[in-house]
Image (spheres, rainbow, N blue to C red):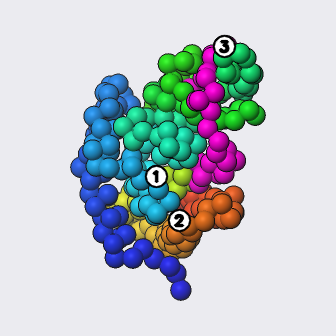
Amino acid sequence: MLLEFDADQRLWQETVRDAVAKQCPPKLVRSIAEDGVDPSPLWKTYVDAGWTELTDPENAVELAIVLEELGRATDPTPFLATLTQFAPLAGDRFDSQQAGTAVYGGVTAHRDADGWVLYGTAHHVLDGDRAERLAVVTDAGVFVIDAGEAVVRRSPVFDPVLHIAEVSFDGVHVPDTERVHVDAERAYHVALTGMAITTVGACQRILDLVLEGAAGRRVVAVVIIGVYVQVQSRLASRRKCQRRHKSFICVIMRVKDWIHFDLRFARVRICDAIIPVRDIIVANV
């Protein structure tokens, strides 16, 4: 038997989906991507709704639902980086009003008389160019600092909505009070799991679009009708598979003791729900 969301969680899912449809419609995402419209008002909507406060393990299922729905909508804000990358590293330094991200790899920390000095460059930092706070992971620990301390350059990528940046530190002095003691490896796996859940939502939207497109071609010719039936059958199978993996999301998000749960295994299972839509289109169109 598949595990499903309970009534309260289904209501939360419907509430989030309705809110995202209203506040983050495709037209807004397109204007941000093509016309450079500022997504800050949308981010403030999430803050005002309390979504950026879903950092407690007790709210893990609710956060997962929000991540999936934002993935469906191609969310153009730094929500994913803030809640799944920065927050797990920042701990009690996390401020729900500020956007943040994690800097993994490429940076070293050296002791000096006043604390620590950061050197190095991290590549492919999600939302590094628009985060207000950075959680910098080094061998000496994790340092939570203002983003203005680093030199940031946005990197060109294929998706105009996606913000990827190069973050550099050239002798940045950090006091010892800015160092936090957290399980960085654990936080890393939480971040990747959040990315996988978001991608599940994006793939669900792709599936919906493929099915709608196939349905629209039924009237073209008898051959297309046959293609539609075949695509519909394959998509139905994929939807069943994806529902199974969504149920698995429910399971892992309900685990209270994340320290003893292998998120690497969880992430692999969730990634199975990332549908190879390209194969369906190539085979049937």
Q: Earlier in the sequence, mark 3 or mark 1?
A: 1
How many labels sit on residues? Answer: 3
Q: Marks 2 and 1: which is nearer the front?
A: 1
Name which quarter of the figure residue 95 lies in: top left
| Residue 278 picture location, percent across and down | 57, 53
Q: Name the kind of residue labelled 2 in the image.
A: Met
User: Crowding at label 1, few (<14), some or many (≥20) Cα neighbours within 10 Å?
Assistant: some
* Residue at left offset 66%, top offset 51%: 186
* Horizontal relation, residue 10 to residue 151: left or right: left
Q: Secondary structure at mark 1?
A: loop
Q: Which residue is mark 2?
A: 253
Q: Which mark is residue 170?
A: 3
Q: Compute the Cα span from label 2 to label 1.
A: 12 Å
Say which residue appears at 27% left-offset and 53% top-offset. 19
Residue 261: give x, y in percent of width and height.
66, 65
Vertical placement of residue 52 versus 154, above or below = below
Question: Would you say residue 261 is visible in this rendering?
Answer: yes
Q: Is residue 31 left or right of residue 194?
A: left
Q: Is residue 36 left or right of residue 60?
A: left
Q: Three-letter amino acid code at disc 3?
A: Asp
Q: Which mark is residue 55?
A: 1
Q: Residue 220 falls in which quadrant of the image? A: bottom left
Q: Residues within 10 Å of mark 2 (few under 14, many from 20)?
A: some
Range shown magenta: 164-193
Q: Type of residue at label 1?
A: Thr
